[in-house]
Image: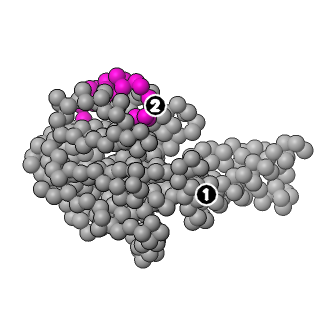
Amino acid sequence: MRLFWLLNLASGFLILATLLPLWRREVWWVRGWDFPRLQLAWLAGVLLLLQIALLDITSTLGLGLIFATAACLGYQLWWIFPYTPLARREVLSSDTCDERNSLAMLTANVLTTNRQAARFLALVDEMSPDIVVTLESDAWWQDQLDALEPRYPHTLKCPLDNLYGMHVYSRLPLHDAQVDYLVEKDVPSMHAMVELRSKQYVRVHFLHPAPPSPTENEASSERDAELIMVAKSLDGYRKPVVVTGDLNDVAWSETTRLFRKISGLLDPRVGRGMYNTYHAGLPLVRWPLDHLFHSEHFTVRSLRRLAPFGSDHFALYGKLVLDSRYVGEQDGLESDKDDEAWAEEKLAQENVDPSDVPVPRV
């Protein structure tokens, strides 16, 4: 009898956790259930096996629980399937080693309280990216990161002690580089035009919006507005673009999908894997929070989650190759009228305008 009630309780929890994100309320205790879809899928799978083995499948209640659990499993798998190697790749793999048109980026939330900078700098040495992007980097981290300047002379620095400091170190020239505060006065973003070795230019945006949580923003509206502002600023832009950072949103959430639909950017993880970058210290509680999106002008040479370095995030490394041969052959998500209306609603909630997003120029 106790096992029966435990199965009922677990099934009720699973059904509630699956249904809550369908409610478009932006409060943290609703939006938080966008994150653990992989974990909920595992829970549904285990529960389904136990129910089939232990419940009376001839009873209405037993059969109903099995059906509900199977539906939850299928629904969660629908969201995460694109981020498995079984799905079709959204971005083609590069068949060239054209260094003149390549752009390698290492993005890492270093964790402000983490003091293992030497391990992080060793990762930079190992991967030798063209651009290093750090989030949560304060003045102490800036002192450590400045050791990169002889090799990465082009920089943007915004040291903060509120968990939203941000730094960019680049060996490639950064044109019209600037720091801006798109939605919240203490949450910066960075924007620039990167000049590749081939003299081609790539528009880049580095983001780290605040998450919905009981300790920060109670709702996701600020995060969502920042993502949609940038997405709308890219709508109709037909030149190479890269957006990277810790977006405090998972790859499979409705908001991230909306960002991709409005911006037209591609996700190189689709068909390759989840690349779960958070939480580095808790293997059973991981999801993809750090992102690398790009326009159809690029193919992927390499995409890797790097070794831990003391932060609660893993660093994400991506090497893209600018290749005009495949423009028009790589398809992402497309928006419809409902998406456009939802995007406008999110902007109106925070009273922000996409025209306020810096458009770097050369």
Residue displayed at 57% across by 66% down: 24
Q: Amino acid at mark 2?
A: Thr
The mark closer to the camera, 1 or 2, is: 2
Q: Is residue 117 left or right of residue 197?
A: right
Q: Secondary structure at mark 1?
A: helix
The one of 150 and 321 positioned closer to us in this rendering = 150
Residue drawn at the location 80% of the way across and 51% of the way down: 8
x%, y% of residue 142?
Answer: 31, 33
**Residue 266 showing in the rendered view:** no
Give the residue number, with chain letter if any, for mark 1.
Answer: 30
Q: Going by the picture, which residue comes out furthest to the bottom?
A: 337
Q: Quadrant of the C terminus?
A: bottom left
On screen, residue 56 versus residue 86, left or right, reads right
Q: Is residue 112 left or right of residue 26?
A: left
Q: Residues within 10 Å of mark 1 (few under 14, many from 20)?
A: some
Residue 143, percent from left and from top = 30, 29
Start and end of the magenta stretch? 109-129
Which residue is more in the foreground, 31 or 114? 114
Q: Residue at x 49, y 61 (%)?
A: 221
* The residue positioned farthest toward the right in the image shown: 1
Q: Which of 168 and 83 lies nearest the eye of the viewer?
A: 168
Q: Which residue lies under the disc numbered 2?
A: 113
In magenta stretch: residue 113: yes
